[in-house]
Amino acid sequence: MFLDRYSFRQIADPRAVREGWERLRNRRGPDFDRTLGQPMVREGLAALHDGDWDMIGAIYREQAADDRYLWIELMSALWPLRRPLPTGARRGPALTVAGGLLVGLAWRHGGTGPAHLPSGTQRAEMVDGLRHARLALEMARQADGPDVVALGFALRAAMGLSDHEGVAAQTDLLRATAEPCLAADLALLTAWEARWGGSQQDMWAVIRDRERQGPAWIALDMRGRLEDCVWHEHMSEEPGVAEAHRARREDPCYTAEMLQLQAGALRGLARDQPRARRLIAHNVIGASMACLVSWQLAAPHLEAIGPHLAEGAWAQVEDVSDPARALARLRRRAGLEPLAA
């Protein structure tokens, strides 16, 4: 099972029987909302379909940074992969959206994760898209100055192009920005992981640099711990590393640290936050608690996200190829009732 690789315990999964029984009893949960409840996604896609870049720029300016970032990410996941984006993006915000969409579409061409091996055609389409994306994002920066969302997508473009100098340059620009954006900082964390060409020490330097921006940024620490687990216990070839890291996780002090971090996050996220930031944080922290401590401790985060499962946050913990069923399994393992249809 996909899950067992990361949860380190054998789980007898009766999901096929249970899901068949639920279908017979017409108890399937609600259809998965690919907009994750973000209110501007459908408006943005409609404007994009019409080629109305002025409207797209106006929608962009209405939102906080994390909402803007997630908005672009969701639209790039929903836009037909083989349909070209409309032309006509000429002003800063519209160029940022166009560049971000091109980054998302390029990664869809290439596949996800460092272990994925795209075909020659897929790789060529990915590289071409990322080069066009970088041009649009650089034009946006020249027009409007640094924008944390544009810098986050430019960082992902540099990652996809295996441009380590570009990653370093975008990192410096991101660290100099004043506007907080958890989504961009999670991309920054990923860019410096060992499996993307950096090191786990580099990753933690990023986390320590960015974590003081608010309680939602506890998600960075949690994600860092999950990535340490994946790297040290499943990917590193250094002798003894897996055993040492596993012993660290089994230490009661490790669990106490995780519980303390979670308590601080839950208190902080109860206060006013941009919607996307709260959603991203709960997804990331929930996945980390489920994998590293226990499924029951993921429950408050699964309750907070409701039907809005961010697939990328859970992909290392659960098979999310069918996100609606994945969410039902996650809730079941956390001891929660199914969501109402």
Image (cartoon, rainbow, N blue to C red):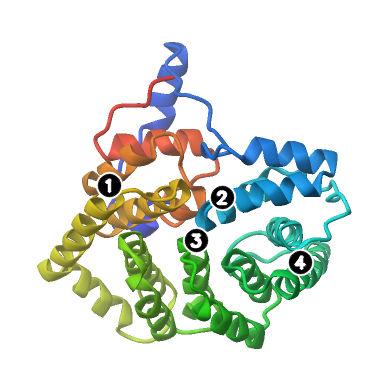
Mark 2 / mark 3, whichever is N-terminal: 2
Looking at the image, do the residues carrying marks 2 and 3 touch, with CB atoms under 8 Å apart? no
| Quadrant in the picture for residue 78 | top right
Q: Position of residue 45 (x, y in %)?
A: 72, 40
Q: Compare residues 237 and 331 and report the one nearer the observer.
A: 331
Q: Find the distance from the CA under tag 4 to the CA under tag 1.
A: 36 Å
Q: Which residue is mark 3?
A: 183
**Seen in the image, is 289 located left or right of residue 20?**
left
* Residue 270: mark: 1
Q: Position of residue 330 (x, y in %)?
A: 36, 40
Question: Residue extending furthest right?
Answer: 87
Residue at the (66%, 46%) spot, across then down: 59
Q: Compare residues 3 and 223 and report the one nearer the observer.
A: 223
- Mark 2 vs mark 1: in front: 2
Q: Compare residues 9 and 31 and report the one nearer the observer.
A: 31
Q: Find the distance from the CA under tag 2 to the CA under tag 1.
A: 20 Å
Looking at the image, do the residues carrying marks 4 and 3 touch, with CB atoms under 8 Å apart? no
| Quadrant in the picture for residue 217 | bottom left
**In the rendered view of the protein, which quadrant contains the C terminus?**
top left
Name the amino acid type tagged 2: Gln
Mark 4 / mark 1, whichever is N-terminal: 4
Element at label 3: helix
